[in-house]
């Protein structure tokens, strides 16, 4: 029996048959649903209803649907791209719908966004994008909404994406960028301010950064020193990046199939995360250098790299994490460097369980808005609100202050965020410097330059001596780093 597929090559569920019911009447026709698109729809629903994270729910949905290879890649691009470009598509849909989008049933709006992404940003024929989306709505919602979906998507298909943006985007620079690059306006403003504070004042820098947030990030591996090598990972299908001395960019395939990754000797880790850990380990200290602390360790990537570096120095790392389930992830992720750990503990970094002046080096990878990793977490831009900073910034200040209490005089603390927002970077550092007279900012840029194999340029942060990485310049998450010396 032939596999029922649409013209784009995807399998369908519920294909019509010619069988008759008893009495000779044909059965009521069933909507034919394309399996990959149905899987994408299920991911969209989980993200919307359950506040799920795309990268966590997607693998489960793909397994449940039995999708692999090209079909799995299609679903991944369809979901991730739709969520990233949601702001752009919603502006276009508002021009094609005769009611506020808030009045459109959420299940239908999910499908309209998926259809818009296929029409405007994927190489899907117009008839296939519309008909499969209509079939999906007919099966999951009903016949009436299916007709509405058909009418709206036909309007969407009338123009190319660039033409639509010129039609629906406001003319002011921030408003235009928000629609063109699909970011909330407050995030565009915050990123623009951060770029300017770091010396990037050209409008093209903002466009490049926002564009990079919409790109699919490449998978980067870390060769944990002493137990894996860059050459080994390169032989498995990667290529050295030249930024971190331990980084290899995977050119394709499943990272879990790389032997060193499967064995825990290497891991998947953004290169920016590698850079900040290596920077902390590379600072020259006077006196003892035996006790290191990762104060916000979950899920454990930086802890594993730091522990591997510590092992080469005869030092030991304590990994502390407030949430028990994340502490378990740390323990699992550091199993191959366990000999360099003094423990994995469940503890609140704002209320340390250890004595002051205990550690030589401390990493504070503080909870933050995550606006430096929007390319990796497509739903984050729509969930974060400016008011989130009111809770995050005081927490970041407390964590940094307790970390400085925990490090010995002469030791160093690395304050790190995966956000370039000035309130979380410049603001926290300057607050700390104003509140304490025993802290100075080390030149992290010079420290990085002095590390063998590290090649980081154009990375000046908003406070002299600090480092700010950028997706469009360094192909990393937008990691911020301040190295603080305690006297």
Image (cartoon, grey):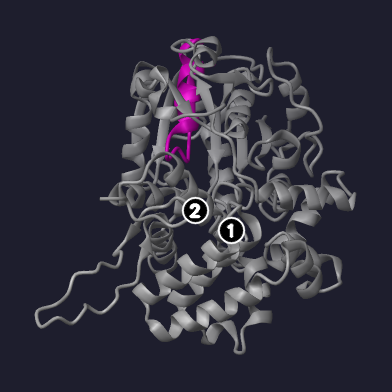
Query: Circle 2 — which element?
Result: loop
- Any mark on residue 178, and which? none
Q: CA distance from mark 2 to mark 1?
A: 8 Å
Pointer 1 residue: 125
Task: Where is residue 78? Give x, y as percent.
Answer: 52, 55
Q: Are marks 2 and 1 in contact (CB under 8 Å)?
A: yes
On the image, the x and y values in percent for residue 460 come to 80, 36
Vertical position of residue 59 compared to residue 318: above or below: below
Residue 410 or residue 98, whichever sits in front: 98
- For label 2, the crowd category at 10 Å Cα-Cα, with few meaning under 14, some 14 to 19 and many 20 or more, is some
Residue found 67% across the figure and 32% down from its top: 483
Asked if residue 15 is among those painted magenta in the image, a careful observer would answer no
Badge number at residue 8: 2
**Residue 411 visible in this rendered orientation of the protein:** no
Residue in the foreground of this view, choosing between 358 and 325: 325
Crowding at mark 1 (Cα within 10 Å: few <14, some 14-19, many 20+): few
Question: Which portion, as a residue range, is magenta?
Answer: 289-313
Residue 247 visible: yes
Q: Quadrant of the C terminus?
A: top right
């Amino acid at each position: 029996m032939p596999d029922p597929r649409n013209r784009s090559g995807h399998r369908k569920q519920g294909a019509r048959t010619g069988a008759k019911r008893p009495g000779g009447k044909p059965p009521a026709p069933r909507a034919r649903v394309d399996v990959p698109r149905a899987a994408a729809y299920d991911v969209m629903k989980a993200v919307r209803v359950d506040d799920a994270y795309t990268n966590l729910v997607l693998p489960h949905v793909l397994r449940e649907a039995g999708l692999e290879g090209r079909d799995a890649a299609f679903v991944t691009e369809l979901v991730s791209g739709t969520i990233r470009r949601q702001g752009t598509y919603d502006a276009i849909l508002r021009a094609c719908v005769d009611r506020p989008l808030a009045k459109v049933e959420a299940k239908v709006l999910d499908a309209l966004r998926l259809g818009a992404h296929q029409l405007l940003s994927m190489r899907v024929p117009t008839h296939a994008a519309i008909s499969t989306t209509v079939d999906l709505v007919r099966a999951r919602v009903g016949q009436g909404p299916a007709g509405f979906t058909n009418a709206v998507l036909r309007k969407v298909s009338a123009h190319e994406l660039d033409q639509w943006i010129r039609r629906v985007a406001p003319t002011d620079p921030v408003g235009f960028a928000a629609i063109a690059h699909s970011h909330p306006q407050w995030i565009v403003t915050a990123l623009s301010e951060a770029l300017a504070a770091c010396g990037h004042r050209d409008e093209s820098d903002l466009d490049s950064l926002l564009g990079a947030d919409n790109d699919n990030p490449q998978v980067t591996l870390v060769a944990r020193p002493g137990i894996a090598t860059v050459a080994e990972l390169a032989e498995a299908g990667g290529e050295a990046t030249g930024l971190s001395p331990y980084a290899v960019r995977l050119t394709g395939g499943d990272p879990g199939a790389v032997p060193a990754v499967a064995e825990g000797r290497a891991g998947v880790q953004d290169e920016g995360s590698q850079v900040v850990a290596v920077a902390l380990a590379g600072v020259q200290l006077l006196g003892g250098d035996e006790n290191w602390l990762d104060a916000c360790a979950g899920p454990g990537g930086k802890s594993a790299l730091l522990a591997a570096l510590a092992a080469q120095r005869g030092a030991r790392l304590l990994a502390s994490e407030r949430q028990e389930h994340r502490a378990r992830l740390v323990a699992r992720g550091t199993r191959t460097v366990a000999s360099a750990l003094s423990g994995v503990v469940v503890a609140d970094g704002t209320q340390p369980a250890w004595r002051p002046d205990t550690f030589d080096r401390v990493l504070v990878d503080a909870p933050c808005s995550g606006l430096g990793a929007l390319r990796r977490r497509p739903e984050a831009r729509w969930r974060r609100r400016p008011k989130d900073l009111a809770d995050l910034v005081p927490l970041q200040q407390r964590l940094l202050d307790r970390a400085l209490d925990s490090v010995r005089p002469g030791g160093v603390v690395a304050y790190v965020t995966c956000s370039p927002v000035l309130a979380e970077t410049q603001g926290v550092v300057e607050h700390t410097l104003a509140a304490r007279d025993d802290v100075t900012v080390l030149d992290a840029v010079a420290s990085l330059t002095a590390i063998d194999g590290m090649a980081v340029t154009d990375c000046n942060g908003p406070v002299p001596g600090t480092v700010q990485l950028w997706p469009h310049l360094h192909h990393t998450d937008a990691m911020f780093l301040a190295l603080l010396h305690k006297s």
